[in-house]
Amino acid sequence: MEIKKACPLKDKNWFQTGGSAEYFCEPTTPKEFQEALIFSQDKNLPITLIGLGANMLISDDGVKGLVIHPLLKTITLAEKNNEISVVAGAGVTIEELINYCLDNNLIGLEEFSGIPGTVGGSVYINVHYFKYNLQQFVIEGQVIDKKTGEIKTVDRDWFEFGYDHSKLHDKKYFLVNATFKVQSATEVETAYARGRSDEIIRHRITRYPYKGTCGCFFRNFHDEEVTLEINGKKMIYVSYYLDKLGIKGELTIGGACVSHQHANMIVNTGNATSTDIIKLAKKMQELVKKEFGILPQTECQLVGFKENPLIS
């Protein structure tokens, strides 16, 4: 496994911005993953993991230490107590996993169609779409201890899943693979699921920007953070407040612009820097705070910044 120095990261994230990694590697097996951790220990380097880079903003100054891009691509079937499941490596993309399932007449995971990301990143963030969270499908996983390199199997409860959260945020363990609950289906049921997958993707492309973005930049509010109620329910959706500001397709700083399709999505119009995106996000925070008295907090992972560049 090659460990590169001063490796550019601009082409390894969806925003297409950011500097270089001090060190960079792409382990393809658990053993190579362990070797990468040994390298970081020997040189006393901090570790950063990236998948498809679809939910992150990388500092223009780059990332100190070792950046690991896991390419563990194995997908296998497992059966226990007459229930079938699929085991996917951390580097498998969600698209690859869904297609594998449908090719084998297994359904359920197509609910996440069109979401860019790997298994590792998706478990890390507990990816969600409408009423589904990935935790509903996770049975167990294998994780690697950052300090010792030991690989152990853990159950779903170990992950302590929450909204946009898992125990992996502690960054003491990294995902090697995950086992997902799926349902065996007939050819007709699979055909229906495949059609549903295509329709979800079509809907997402129509409704959201699909390049030069990290998706939703800010997380939704928690109930206790807001007072506004509509039809007896707390209005927790940050996009509601951003929409009210009239900034869609209008608010721009440098090469960064609020998407004309979605008020909570920032897009790189072609020549944006991460600094442009941060300035724009901070302006969005200030406008919401001034108008509604509440402060949006980031959902996008900020990577390589010495300190939080946003208002916290």
Image (spheres, rainbow, N blue to C red):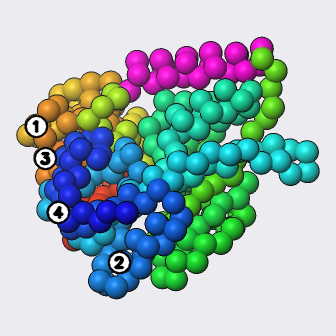
Residue under numbered circle 2? 40
Q: Amino acid at mark 2?
A: Ser
Residue 294 is one of the magenta-drawn residues? no
Q: Nearer the viewer, residue 99 or 109?
A: 99
Asked if the residue under mark 1 is in contact with the one under mark 3, i.e. CB atoms within 8 Å, the reply is no
Residue 19, numbered circle: none
Q: What is the residue that sits farthest to the front in this orientation?
A: 1
Q: Which is closer to the viewer, label 1 or label 2?
A: 2
**Quadrant that contains the C terminus:** bottom left
The residue lying at 40 percent from left, 35 percent from top is 240
Q: Badge 4 is on which residue?
A: 6
Q: Secondary structure at mark 2?
A: helix
Residue pictured at 54% horizontal, 22% vertical: 200
Whether residue 111 is visible: no
Q: Residue furthest left?
A: 254
Label 4 environment density (alpha carbons within 10 Å; few <14, some 14–19, many ≥20): some
Residue, disc 1: 271
Coordinates of residue 275 in the picture (x, y in percent):
13, 52
Mark sitting earlier along the chain (1/2): 2
Residue at x-position 37% and y-position 63%: 1
Graded by Cα atoms within 10 Å as few (under 14), some (14 to 19) or many (20 or more), the crowding at tag 1 reads: few
Q: Which mark is residue 273?
A: 3
Q: Earlier in the sequence, mark 3 or mark 2?
A: 2
